[in-house]
Image (spheres, rainbow, N blue to C red):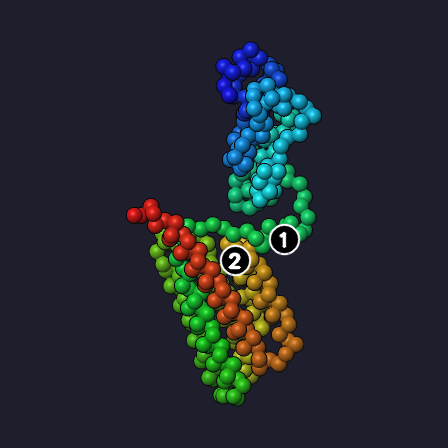
């Protein structure tokens, strides 16, 4: 509704986007009215309507100027909107100008923190259950996942190598057999990470590039443990898979920060496996490690392939 509809009231601006102090006809106005208007726009984007909608100008003005009228909440219309985003919007719509963001830059900074999933500086404290749900549920959206093939190759390599090592230990084969296969396993892991890292950097997204670096770190950490383990165990490699599980579990946990919150859980589960390995015979550690890691790699591979296909499908109409 434009000023022509309410000129008799001496009020300038578009009524639905006015701040309460502006609708009341106050003369001393500040940039707080602009923050309120931005809040109305955000409210409209989130809910499809303005906060103080009404059938006529008089109704909108009455709701705006009535100090007992509660500010409509976003969650009333959209319960699925994240709490932090609703808090940003509601602060913009505060009836008290001093309670709003001091500038558009402060508002933009708050939205930036929401986008990268950083806590709001002035956000109310959340319960531990809400905090955990948010941490485990978030996922960084990427335009594509061209590296989806890597976990499939990793799973195949892990399964083959650990199956041979487990059988060699159970059949009391010479220790060099397991040692050779372990060298193959670490070499194949390094090769996959190298192929991922050597891919055109314009193709890989930031998540994939950071994942390749994490893979290198995990592989080098595991490789550095092998000589010491072989020294203390007289050449038997079964014992190396307990620290391997802890290191890789930590690496997967780190991916929870860089990509997907559910990887926190996967990392904790693998570290939990490392903690409980001493409860069963060492000779079965390679099999336990191999099964757990292969299952994880397969599940991640299918997830990444689905994400990549969805991205390719979404881009297809634009390329036609």
Q: Secondary structure at mark 2?
A: helix
Q: Is residue 318 above or below residue 266?
A: above
Please report the residue visible at 43 percent of the width from the left and 75 percent of the height from the top. Answer: 184
Expressed as whole percent of the image width and height from the top left, the position of residue 87 reads 61, 37
Above/below status of 231 relative to 75: below
Q: Which mark lies nearer to you, 2 or 1? A: 1
- Up/down of 34 relative to 139, above or below: above
Q: Residues within 10 Å of mark 1 (few under 14, many from 20)?
A: few
- Residue drawn at the location 62% of the way across and 67% of the way down: 272
Q: Which residue is mark 2?
A: 255
**Secondary-structure class at tag 1:** helix
Identity of the residue drawn at 35% across and 56% down: 200
Location of residue 152 by image quarter? bottom left
**Gap between marks 2 and 1, in whole Å?**
16 Å
Report crowding for label 2: few under 14, some 14 to 19, many 20 or more residues within 10 A (C-alpha). many
x, y (%) of residue 162? 49, 77
Tell whether 317 sits left or right of 34. Answer: left
Q: Is residue 263 visible?
A: yes
**Quarter of the figure with residue 30:** top right
Outermost residue, front direction? Answer: 55
Q: Is residue 306 left or right of residue 11?
A: left
Residue annotated with mark 1? 132
**Of callouts 2 and 1, the N-terminal one:** 1
């Amino acid at each position: 509704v434009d000023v022509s509809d309410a000129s008799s009231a001496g009020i300038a601006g578009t009524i639905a986007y006015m701040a309460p102090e502006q609708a009341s006809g106050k003369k001393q106005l500040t940039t707080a009215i602009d923050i309120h208007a931005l809040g109305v726009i955000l409210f409209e984007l989130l809910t499809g309507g303005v906060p103080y909608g009404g059938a006529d100008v008089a109704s909108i003005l009455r709701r705006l100027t009535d100090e007992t009228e509660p500010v409509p909440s976003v969650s009333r219309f959209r319960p699925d909107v994240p709490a932090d985003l609703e808090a940003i919007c509601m602060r913009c719509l505060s009836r008290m100008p001093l309670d709003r963001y001091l500038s558009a830059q402060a508002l933009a900074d708050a939205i930036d923190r929401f986008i990268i999933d950083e806590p709001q500086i002035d956000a109310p404290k959340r319960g531990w259950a809400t905090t955990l749900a948010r941490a485990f549920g978030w996922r960084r959206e990427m335009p594509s996942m061209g590296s989806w093939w890597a976990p499939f190759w990793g799973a195949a390599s892990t399964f083959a190598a650990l199956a041979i090592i487990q059988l060699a230990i159970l059949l009391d084969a010479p220790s060099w057999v397991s040692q050779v296969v372990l060298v193959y396993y670490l070499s194949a892991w390094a090769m996959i990470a190298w192929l991922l890292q050597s891919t055109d950097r314009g193709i890989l997204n930031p998540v994939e590039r950071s994942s390749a670096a994490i893979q290198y770190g995990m592989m080098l950490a595991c490789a550095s443990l092998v000589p010491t383990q072989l020294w203390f165990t007289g050449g038997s490699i079964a014992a190396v898979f307990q620290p391997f599980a802890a290191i890789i579990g930590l690496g997967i946990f780190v991916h929870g920060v860089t990509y997907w919150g559910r990887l926190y859980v996967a990392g904790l589960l693998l570290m939990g496996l490392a903690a409980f390995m001493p409860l069963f015979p060492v000779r079965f550690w390679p099999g336990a490690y191999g099964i757990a890691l292969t299952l994880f790699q397969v599940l991640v591979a299918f997830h990444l392939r689905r994400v990549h296909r969805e991205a390719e499908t979404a881009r297809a109409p634009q390329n036609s």
